[in-house]
Amino acid sequence: MKRWCVGPMPVEEFLDELLPPAPKGKGVRVMPSCKGAFNRIPVDPKDEQAIYEKLIPAINYKKRCPSLNFVDTSTRSELSSLGALKPDICAYDSSALDVLERELTENPYTSDRKKRRIPAHFGYAELFIEVKKNEERDPFVDPLYKDDEGICSETNFFVQHESSKIRKKTEEDIGQIVSYATEACARQHRMFYFSVSIHGHHARFIRWDRAGAVVTRSFNYRQNPKLLCDFLWRFGFANPAQRGYDPTVSVASEKDEQDFKTTVTAHVALQLDLDGDKLEEAVGQHYQQKKVGSLEMAFLKDTWRIDVKGREKEGTILERLNVNGAMHISDLFCHGDVPVDIERVREEVYRERESAAKKASEKEAVMMEEDVAKDTTMKDLDAMELDGQSVNPGKSTNTCQDATSGTVEGGGVRTAGLNRSTVIQAENEAGRSGEQTEDDANHSNNEPHNFIKNPQCTRTDEFAHSPWACNGGRMVKVTKHTHYRLLLKAVGYPLQEFTGTRELFDVTLDAFEALIDAHEICKILHRDVSPNNIILVKDPATGRRRGILIDWELSTVADSNGEARDHNRSVSNFPQHRNENEIYQYGTIDFYGTWAFMSAESLDAGANFRHSIKDDMESMLYVVLYCCVRWLPHNEVDLLGHRMHRFFDQYEIGNYGALVGGDAKTGQMVRGTFTRDFIFNNAHVQSWINTAYSYLYPISTSTPDKFEGKWTPESFKQLWIDTCREKLPDNDRVKHDISDKKQLYYEMYEAKVPSTIVTVEQIVVGAPIGQRAHSNRRARTGVHGDPKDNNVAGPSEHLQQELMITEPGPCSKRKIHDTYDDPAE
């Protein structure tokens, strides 16, 4: 948290900048008097309970936060499992309370008085308040002001306790509030989230977003109750968007829900060849009644992209790959940044298109008159040559591109309406019709006009270098993130669901061809090859599942030497703390990919490492090796889980706390230390692994000259093709016992934790879409969103590219309004 936390922001500035003022005027309720508002809270409380037992009625009695009810949730969570999250106080609106109370009544296991209390439910919590007994537990420290110099920028905002016991408790307290904010935003569609931290008689306000957290100065709410009262009053009158909810998400209708179930059922039946009860069971992994909404079967990636100059959007990269015919890449429906005010965007798009259509019509009429005149003066000619084409006299040759798709011919105008794919970044119709406005002076005619003047963006980064920000004693790098959505046609199952050796080698060959095509045709390096980024999609024509390589947001363009242009890369987080696999450096764009599958050199090369296609090839080798050892039949060597952990997750802490790794992978290249004990049932699997390593590191073989120069895309692909030509078993998948290791990091964070892109050192809380039980958002202690992918915890890791929402709470049955840049337009 130290790297992405900004503070201490003056409380009044926090309120004015980050919360709207409460309404005033005739007929509007006046804020209750603040005098003595919290005097009933004990001067010397014996414990935390003594504080929140008095604080809750002080807020609720006079409705200091209109429309919300504050509830003691300190003893019960919606989840009964270990690690259940229970903030001391949660705020719910009346509709949420009705739902929670109804669930308590209907639940036969809540007869116990304690169990009948309203639980902490992060699907509904509008905000939470965490209480500690005294100021000693406050993890932050406010610096002293200097006369006219403001706050000393050298001051460390995080308190440094001499007592190791207290220091450990404050670190745990930080992890606690981070996990609460993370969970709330993982369960709700949020742009940001508010919370309050109370330490004895002092309080701080915190605003969380995907760039980090803004924390206020501490204030005494007993002596100065107006600040807390003002916050609660403003928050109570704020609309959902002002409280942080994503306004582009709305509750789905019953018809949407039924359409979704019908579409998912048909798709699952196609992908898995199931019917009857087995089909119903499989559909149940992706569909929960009353908890989904849908537009149509597609993959919606809901993420918060790192918004820095020169970094391409994933959709732009996919457009280039699609246009150039790269194999085994999902087709793109549309993509774009998400607006704060969707209705305003729709109106602007509509007006722009109407204007463009009108101009096109007028221009067409003028051109037709010119053609008639030409026809009169050249009536003796049978034909004329225009731009190298033979044109009959009297026929209009002019066409004007319409914004949607198509042309306006012969003076007929087709008005572009707001269809399912209303654009976020629509085409500049004025420029396309040949007339350039002053605003478009800096845009080419083919460049999209950005309608999103106010996209959903983080704000923590805005305050990172404010005069009051105390960044001393720590590295603070907070990067702007922008809410972004991308809609893909490919909807399938993750590679981990392969049925046997035949399918594993077929689909990974497909993914490898996608990797090579992207590099050879478009000079693009993927840089995040992992099992989770290869999906299986059945081809209806052949009845076979093919591999599709997805998740190109970390890709980059190669230079003339075939190396990544943005080559300064350094890892800063432990493998077990990564979220959705991406390792980020201090919240900047510095990242590698998925630790378990990164090349040996990239794990140990330092900041000046330059990624090339050979590193992507090595990652593909590790993907196949991982799947073979984990799920194909072999002699099942002792301590399999421990061995896999040592090979795929190994790391050490290097200079300045940076992570280094790759020793185990290097040892495998040189001496075969990992694979030498494995004997696979299928000899072709054994041969593929051994030969691939001979290509990668020929000096380790007895005949190095034979394999020298073979580590090339062409040779590696041919090895794959030759193996696929062999007779490989179709259904030999097994599940090996890895109980000697509690869980591999990759599987633990891919299967257990919801989210978008994160680490312990970063905070990016969000509400992704989909039913992937992922780690995009945290290891229960921190998040950083990315975002990526976007994707919310659900009952299954299956059908990972699915347009749906399965979160409990007020966002359970929701649909995303379509506001994307359609490449077809």
Image (cartoon, rainbow, N blue to C red):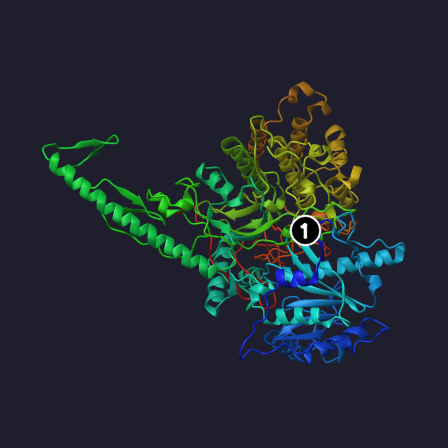
Q: In the picture, residue 68 is in which quadrant?
A: bottom right
Q: Amino acid at mark 1?
A: Ser
Expressed as whole percent of the image width and height from the top left, the position of residue 166 reads: 87, 58
* Front residue (pair 500, 771): 771
Q: In the picture, residue 715 is in which quadrant?
A: top right
Q: Can I make out residue 351 in this image?
A: yes
At 66% from the left and 70% from the top, the residue drawn is: 230
At 84% from the left and 53% from the top, the residue drawn is: 160
Label 1, on which residue? 466
Q: Is residue 420 left or right of residue 531?
A: left
Expressed as whole percent of the image width and height from the top left, the position of residue 411 reads: 23, 48
Expressed as whole percent of the image width and height from the top left, the position of residue 379 reads: 10, 35
Q: Is residue 737 left or right of residue 712?
A: right
User: Could you tell me how many numbered marks the image carries?
Assistant: 1
Secondary structure at badge 1 equals: loop
Expressed as whole percent of the image width and height from the top left, the position of residue 511 reads: 56, 39
Check the image and report above or below for 189 versus 69. Answer: above
* Front residue (pair 618, 501): 618
Check the image and report above or below for 517 versus 167. Answer: above
* Front residue (pair 278, 129): 129
Q: Residue furthest left?
A: 380
Q: Residue furthest right?
A: 163
Q: Residue furthest top?
A: 705
Q: Can I make out residue 729 in this image?
A: no
Q: Is residue 209 left or right of residue 56?
A: left
At 74% from the left and 32% from the top, the residue drawn is: 666
* Badge 1: residue crowd in 10 Å (few <14, some 14–19, many ≥20): some
